[in-house]
Amino acid sequence: MLTANPQLTPDKKLRHLLTTEGLPKSLIENILDTAAQFVSVGDRDVKKVPLLRGKSVFNLFFENSTRTRTTFEIAAKRLSADVINLNINASSTSKGESLVDTIDNLIAMDADVFVVRHSQSGAAHLIAKHVNQVRPNVAVINAGDGRHAHPTQGLLDMYTIRHYKKSFHNLSIAIVGDILHSRVARSGIHALTTLGCPDVRVIGPKTLIPTECERMGVSVHHDMMRGIEGCDVVMMLRLQNERMEGPLLPSAQEFFKSYGLTAEKLARAKPDAIVMHPGPMNRGVEIESTIADGRQAVILPQVTFGIAVRMAVMSMVGVSRGEVA
Amino acid sequence: MRLEIRNGRLIDLSGSNDGRDERATLYVDGAIIAAVGSRAPDGFMADKIVDAAGKIVAPGLVDLCARLREPGYEHKATLESELMAASAGGVTSLVCPPDTEPVLDEPGLVEMLKRRGWTLNQARIYPLGALTAGLKGETLAEMLELAEAGCIGFFQADRPIVDTSVLYRAMQYAATYGFTIWLRPEDAFLARGGIAHDGEVAARLGLAAIPTSAESVAIATICTLMRETGARVHLARLSSAAGVELVRRAKAEGLPVTADVGVHHLLLTDRDIGYFDSQYRFSPPLRSPSDRDALSAGVVDGTINAICSDHTPTDEDEKNVPFGEATPGASGLEMLLPLALKWAEHASIPMSTALARITVNAAQVLGKSQGRLVAGAPADVCIFDPRAFWAVTRETLVSQGKNTPYLAREMQGKVTHTICAGRLVYAA
Amino acid sequence: MQLDAEPLISVLAEKIGSTSPDFGVVGIHTGGVWVAQKLAAKIGATRVGRIAVTLHRDDYTMRGLHTQKNKTEIGFDINGRHVLLVDDVIQSGRTIRAAINELFDFGRPASVKLAVLVDRGGRELPVHADYLAITMPLDGAQKLELTNAGDVLRFEILEG
C-alpha cells in the first residue's frame, strides 16, 4: 500500500529526508533556496552559525564512506551541532544486535538527528518508521541506502544544475553509466522529474539499466553518442570496482569505449553543457581526465554546494517539534 | 459421537455434475459422513446438533503448504499453536514442507511429527519428505523409507537444486516408485540475491530483482525432465504469467503435472510493497498486476489446481529489519478462507469455485478423498459465516506468527465450527 | 496611520554628524538596508553593507528556518574598522544581538555603534541605540513597518 509519504509532517514540512521521490516541488525549491543562504558561510572568518547549537547529530555509517561522512560532519559542525561519528561494521550487527536495537540505544543517548548510510535499500525508511514510534522528535537523514536513494546527493545535483542553468524547464539531461546499482541516479531522476525537467535520459548497457526504468519518467539509450546529443547537463555515475569485470561488463576498458565521457562524445552535447560526477571519479573508466579537469566540469563546485545543501536539510529537520504523525 | 449439522447452506463441488449448493442437513457418524440431505439415516440419533442457519457448510479446507515450524523453530511457532490456528481457519488437512531444523530427511523425524500431530488431535498432517539429504541438493534422500514413514511426496522447499543432474536423477528415482515430486520452480542462478519482482517497483526502490524467467526457465527444465523420466511433479507457488502459460501447455500435452499458488499472490502485487513494507516480502516475490491476473485466470480455468496459504509464521524481529533482510512469507492458515473468498469476489467467480480450490481440488493433488461432503467421505467440515467481519489483529490471530500484510485490516468470512474426522475441533 | 521616514533620517544624520570616509555602514535586512543607504549618503560614508540575521535568530528552534533570498553581503573588510550598524526600528533588541553575532562571523571591527530611526520600547535585552531619531512607545499588538515606494521611505502603523 502506498501510504502517506513518511518523510513529511502532516502540514507537508520536512520531517525526515529519506528519498527525493514524492517530495513536493515547492519543498525541493525551499531546500535549494535555504542552501543558497548557506553557501557563503564557508567564506566567512567564522565558518559557523548557531542554528543547531546544543543538538546532537549522529553519523551512523553501516557502510564505510569517509567522504560522505565528512561532508555531513562539516555541515553539522557549521551549524554548531555536536557530531558523533559511528562506523558500525557488519560484524557488530551480526553479533546479534539488530538495527532497531542499535537505534534504540542511540536514541537513549539523546540523539536529535540520525544521518544514516546502510547497504540495504529501505534501511533509512525502517529507521524513520521506528523513530516515529518511539521518539517522534528525532529526525533521520538518508545518506545512502543500498541502491535506493541518496537524496542529499540528488539535491546537491539539483542545486548545481540550477546554479549553472537557472531553470529546469527547457533542459535535456543525460545520466550515464551504472543506473542499475546507483542510488545517485534514482535520487536525481525523481528530483528532476518533480522540478519539471522535460527530458531526462539514462544511458548505459542493458546490463546496467533496470527493467521498466522508463516508468520513472526517463528515456533509455544504449548508444551514448546519440543519447548525449544536445544535452545541457551530463551526469556521470561512478562504476564500482567490483562491477568492472564479471557478468555485467567484460572490462573497464570496454566500458570506457562505449560509455566513458570523452571530448568526442561531449562535443555532441550543447557547447555550454556542464559535466557532473558524484565522486570519487575513476578517470579513464567513466571519464577522460581532460574532461574531468576541463572548463565544462563542475565536479568541485558540486562538493562545495553539497555542504550547503546538507546544512539546509539538517537545519530544516533539526527543529524541535511537538506532535507529528 | 454423532453430529447433525442442520439449516446450513451446503456447498460441495466434488460431484460429477455441478455439485451441490443447497440447504441440507449433514449427518456425521464417527469419523465418516453418514448422510447428506433432509432425511437422517435409519436409527440416527444425534449426540450434538449444530445449527448452521445463515452459514455455509463446506468441506474442511485442505492446505497444500503450512509451515508448523517443528522441529527446530519453536521460537517462531509450535505445533500446538499452529494446529490450533489451522482449526480456527477451518483447515482440516495440511501439508507441511520439510524445511524444519533438522530437515525432514529421516523417517524417525517424520514419525515423530506424525505422532505429535496425532496426540494434538486437530488437523490431519501430511508431511513432505526432503527430496535431497539435508535439502542440500546433492544426494537423494531415502524416499522409500520416508514414504513408509508417512511422507506423501518429496519437496525441496525453497532451497534450490543447483545441479540439474541431481534433479534429473531425483525425478528418475521418484518415478521408479511412482512418488510425486514437489518443486518450487525457480532457477537458482536467475533468482540469486533477488528480493523483488524485476519490474517498475524494484527499479524505483533499488531492490535486487528476480525476473519471471527464473520461473519459466525452471518450469521448462522440469517439463523436459518429466518427459524423459516420466516423473509426476507438483509445481508449488507459481508466481508469473509466463509460468502459468507453461503449465497450461504442459497439461495440454498430457504431462502429469499439477500446480498451486499462494493465496496472497492472487490478491497482492509488487506495487503493494509501498515504502519497503517487509510484510509484503514473499518468496516467490509478489509480481506485477498482469502476473497476478494471469494467476487468477489460471486458478479459474484449472491450470492451477489449488490455492494454498503458504503459511510461514515468523517472529516480529524477522520482519523488523530492512526489506532485503526480512524473512519472506506471511502467516496464512487463518487467512486462507477469507482471502480465497475475497479473491472470488475480485475475480467475479462463484464462491463455490474458490472453495473447491482450497478443498476438493487440493485433496486431489494429494490423491486423498477429503474435500467432499458425501456419504462415506471423511467427516472434515468447515462451517463459516460468509457475511461476518473480523479484524485481523495480534490478538485475534491464533497463530504465533502475527506477520501478515492484513494486520489491522478487516476480513469477511469467519469460521464458526471446524470438524475434523468427526470431532468438533473448533467452535467460535 | 503613516509616518514619513525621510525627515527622521535627516535627524539621525545630524546627530551622527560627519564621519571619516573610512567608516563602514551596515544595514540590517530589510528596512535597515534602505535606511543605511540614505544615511550613508548624508554622512559621507562610502562603504555600505547589508546583513541578514536569519542564521543567528534565537527563535529558530521554535519557528524553524525562514528562508529568505536575503544574504549578508559586506563588500569590505570589517577587521579593525569602525562600523555603524543601522536598523529602522528597535524593540526587543534580539535582532540587534543576532546582527552583532553575524557581523563578528566576518571579522573583528574596531568598534560598533548602533543607529535606529524609531525606538518603540519593549526591550528584552540590554541593547541601546547610540543614535536615535525618535522614541514612539507602542503596545505589543501594534505593528510598525517601513515601506519603500519609489525610493520614498514611510512607516505604516497598523493596529493589531
Image (spheres, coloured by chain):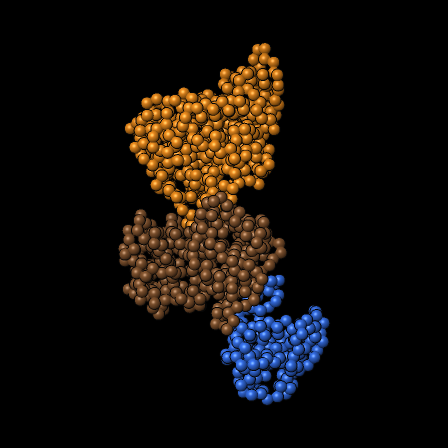
Chain colours: A brown, B orange, C blue
Is residue B77 depicted above or below B6 in this figure?
A: below
- x, y (%) of residue A34? 52, 65
Quadrant of the image occupied by residue B382: top right
Residue extending furthest toward the top: B43
**Is any part of residue B59 visible from this angle?**
no
**Is any part of residue B326 visible from this angle?**
yes
Question: In the image shown, does A121 or B230 lie closer to the viewer?
Answer: A121
Quadrant of the image occupied by residue B168: top left
Image mark count: 0
Is residue C148 depicted above or below B384 in this figure?
A: below
- x, y (%) of residue C51? 55, 75
Quadrant of the image occupied by residue A239: bottom left
- Residue at image point 54% right, 68% down: A49
A206 relative to C7 in the view: left or right: left
- Residue at image point 49% right, 18% down: B377
- x, y (%) of residue B383? 56, 26
- Residue at image point 58% right, 49% down: A134
Question: In the image shown, does B414 or C91 lie closer to the viewer?
Answer: C91
**On-image quarter of the N terminus of chain B:** top right
A189 relative to B398 in the view: left or right: left
- x, y (%) of residue C97? 61, 73
- Residue at image point 53% right, 22% down: B119
**On-image quarter of the C terminus of chain B:** top right
Is residue C120 depicted above or below B122 in this figure?
A: below
Is residue A193 depicted above or below B157 in this figure?
A: below
Question: In the image shown, does A39 or A81 lie closer to the viewer?
Answer: A81
